């Protein structure tokens, strides 16, 4: 953050203050620090050399991926500020007036991810409850390959 302030005394009763400012803030989203498992940080598992495993989506089961497989972004905000204030003294009274202007320029840059592989559901699970014996109900699950 950078700021410049100019105070100008017009008389013993009038003071003007002008301020200029600039602020820049940067935030990284979903940028990995390290792999939680050795396989997630293995670059031999990527689509291309030097990348980590892609995001693998399996319908009904969820998704998994290697280091940096989630969509990453870097967001930057540049803020430009201008303030002008005047203070006037009249007897026992003080009157202050002024205005402020601020312009914020956001910038978002998406970073490439390792790729995505999508699969439809591999299994269809059907269940049937067998309650022929009331004290011991059994649930039968059948796994059917699509």
Image: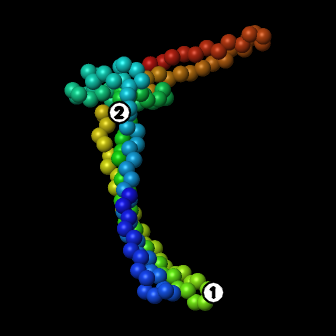
Q: Which quadrant: the N terminus?
A: bottom left
Q: Position of residue 26 (x, y in %)?
A: 37, 50
Q: Residue at x 38, y 44 (%)?
A: 28
Q: Residue at x 33, y 24 (%)?
A: 41
Q: Which quadrant: the C terminus?
A: top left
Q: Which residue is mark 2?
A: 68
Q: Secondary structure at mark 2?
A: loop
Res. 120 visible in picture: no
- Among all residues in the image, which is located at the extreme bottom? 91
Q: Which mark is residue 34?
A: none
> Where 128 falls versus 9 (above or below)?
above
Q: Which residue is mark 1?
A: 92
Q: Position of residue 72 (x, y in %)?
A: 36, 41
Q: Which of marks 2 and 1 precedes in the sequence?
A: 2
Residue 66 location, quadrant: top left
In the image shown, does 81 or 138 lie closer to the viewer?
A: 81
Left or right: 36, with 140 as reference point? left
> Where 10 falls versus 111 (above or below)?
below
Q: Position of residue 56 (x, y in %)?
A: 38, 29
């Amino acid at each position: 953050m950078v700021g410049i302030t100019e105070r100008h005394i017009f008389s013993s009763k009038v003071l003007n203050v002008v301020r200029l400012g600039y602020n820049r803030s940067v935030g990284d989203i979903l940028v990995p620090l390290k792999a939680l498992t050795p396989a997630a940080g293995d670059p031999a598992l990527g689509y291309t050399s030097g990348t980590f495993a892609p995001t693998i989506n399996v319908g009904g089961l969820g998704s998994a991926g290697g280091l940096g497989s989630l969509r990453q972004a870097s967001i930057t905000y540049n803020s430009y500020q201008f303030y002008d204030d005047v203070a006037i003294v009249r007897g026992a009274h003080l009157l202050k007036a002024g205005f402020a202007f601020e312009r914020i320029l956001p910038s978002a840059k998406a970073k490439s991810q390792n790729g995505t592989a999508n699969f439809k559901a591999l299994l269809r699970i059907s269940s049937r409850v067998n309650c022929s014996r009331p004290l011991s109900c059994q649930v039968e699950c059948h796994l059917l390959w699509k």
